[in-house]
Amino acid sequence: MTHKKHNPNRLIRETSPYLLQHAYNPVDWHPWNEHTLKLAIENDKLILVSIGYSACHWCHVMEHESFEDEEVARLMNEHFICIKVDREERPDVDHIFMEAVQLITGQGGWPLNCFALPDGRPIWGGTYFRKPQWLQVLQHFAEMWERRDPALQHQAENVQNGLIDRLSIKIDTQPYDAGQIFQQMARIMLRQGDGRLGGRSGTPKYPMPDLLLFQWLLAQRLPDEGLRNHVLLTLDRMARGGIFDQLEGGFARYSVDERWHVPHFEKMLYDNAQLIGLYAEVSMGTDQRDYEAIVRQTIHWCLSDLYKPGEMFCSALDADSEGEEGRYYVWTQKDFEALPAELVSLLAEWYGIGGQAVWEHDKNVLVRPHNIKAFCQKHQLDEVRWQSLLNKGNQTLLDIRRKRIRPGLDDKQLLSWNALMVKGLCSAFRAFGHTEWLEIAKDVVSFIQKKMKMPDGGLLRSYKNGEARIPAFLDDYAFYIQALTSLYQCTFEEEYLFEARRLTDYTINHFFIADGDFFSYTSHASNDLVVKPREFYDNVIPSSNAAMCLAMTVLGIYFEDDYLLNLAGRMIRNQASLMAQYPAGFSHWGQAMWLHEHQEITVFRGAGAVEYARGKLRQVPQLHLLAASDGDTAIPTLASKPFQEGLWRWKCDNNGCGLPERI
């Protein structure tokens, strides 16, 4: 966004698309860094931290109404040190200020606008404000600071103490019964689900892929028929709803209604990466034929709209285009009149135009309400013939859509989200065997290995315009370690496993808090926040502590490493009672607990072991590990098995390994 009447502010030197969107605001924005924080102390001004992301609709609205306004800018510039933060680039800053605002107001969201003392301690905040409200808030805090109201210091102390309390963890030494916990989690999750439309009850509806993946694990392993049906219902409803782009593939971030119909139109890499893995994983336990098409379409969309060959995947597509949310995606009846005459009514009915697809006024968000067999019988069409006509109609609709102005692309490339995509591609390869997906996953990892490392062997979080920047956070390490172990289980190339182990040791050295048995979200070297952030609760994305716990469990099994297994076990024990009470917030912890309790791994060793193991990938149960070697190996779980003539298999779990079987 360019405003020629204003000179650029300091954000012009940043690479984040979200920050660059604000580079021509009349507000004197600063990026978050040590220099800016010192500036607040030197100038004795309150700090105003405004946090958002490029695909955020209401972030754009507030920018247009307030941050582009001269009157607002004068007040902000005169009384505050104004800092703009991309929450995806600096999730550590977002964590602390979001926790603070939720502590103060009980609510949160983006844009997030929070006031802090010059020393960085938060005092008050909120989300979206209309211009008149925002002017009142600015004037209020400017006047309070002008008279040095002692209430500000008192509030800062209260908020800081509240943050310390909220981010603390209780060490739990009590034993737990994993079987009982899994049964209780299954009962609660099923009770909280929407038995008619899938997902969790209420609105808005988020896909929650990790929660569904955990539910699928319990559905298969307990087994639990109720959970199984719930997961299948949810996946079916999402795939048929407007949250899934019926033409180009890919899922929007969430649905504003309970029917999965009207999405909040932004499309995020992290959602789609996990949903690729979810649909692929569930497909391996069912005879669902639709799932491969959903996975294929979603990967195709990611490759066409987000992937930069030779680099990584970009972050997101905006919800807005031409200043209007969803304009690129919605349809009117008139739009369908451009279709070939024999297709107008058929395709309109197929996608629910004027019926199930209606959003508001004459706008429609395409859905897929019909069963193909029933639809073809109704119209006396052969299924093959209808598929041909549908392909023809879809291409015409795509041609129409592609003449529209596309939503903006957030082209920064984040390590953690790309790691989720690598893992998703690995699951898709295991399920459907398309080697090109595995090759893309390997290419992304190769790029990370070459371009995203610090001199000390640590990782960097963000890449854009040929520059890797910002030391990685815990989620970057945890998800990337998981991506490497997933790649090993598809290829059995041992360098992936050894790099995962190296990075695990690095993460323990730089992030682990020994007296609490958890990992800080930021490294020990990071000191620019009043409280060190930490993540424990799983949400749309798994928490970084849970992801690290699961990663250590996997590596503890491969490397027969009691230190890693014991550390993971203590972390799980600390969460066990909460898991049983609030399963929706502990889905990844639940997966870590399951693997830690069972430690299932099948080992193949001998001539042709790797090829044989690759042929079994689709048959492997969720969270069952594989290891394979044709010859010499340095992986302990393989090296501990004798190499002898022929091909041999060992089935192992937490009770040890059974006798070898000749294959």
Image (cartoon, helix red, strand yellow):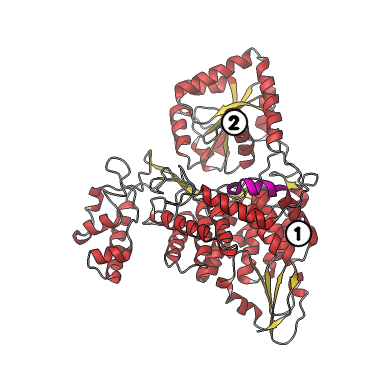
Magenta region, residue range: 574-585
- Location of residue 122 by image quarter: top right
- Location of residue 159 by image quarter: top right
* Magenta stretch secondary structure, dominant: helix
Q: Does 130 sit left or right of 120 as displayed? A: left
Q: Earlier in the sequence, mark 2 or mark 1?
A: 2
Residue 377: x percent and y percent? 25, 66
Q: Amino acid at mark 2?
A: Val
- Of all residues shown, which one is farthest toward the top? 147
> Residue at (43%, 54%) from the top-left corner?
238
Q: Amino acid at mark 1?
A: Leu
> Residue at (66%, 19%) from the top-left corner?
152
Q: In the rendered image, is residue 423 in sight? A: no
> Residue at (49%, 20%) from the top-left corner?
135
Q: Which residue is mark 1?
A: 565
Q: Is residue 517 magenta?
A: no
Q: Is residue 576 magenta?
A: yes
- Contact (Cβ within 8 Å) of mark 2 with mark 1: no
**For numbered disc 1, what is the local secondary structure?**
helix
Is 52 located above or below residue 634 in the figure?
Answer: above
**For numbered disc 2, what is the local secondary structure?**
helix
- Location of residue 342 by image quarter: bottom left
Q: Which residue is mark 2?
A: 101
Quadrant location, the N terminus = top left
Q: Does 143 sit left or right of 527 as displayed? A: left
- Of all residues shown, which one is farthest toward the bottom? 645
Is 135 located above or below residue 385 in the figure?
Answer: above
Q: In the rendered image, is residue 508 in sight? A: yes
Is 112 located above or below residue 222 in the figure?
Answer: above
Quadrant location, the C terminus = bottom right
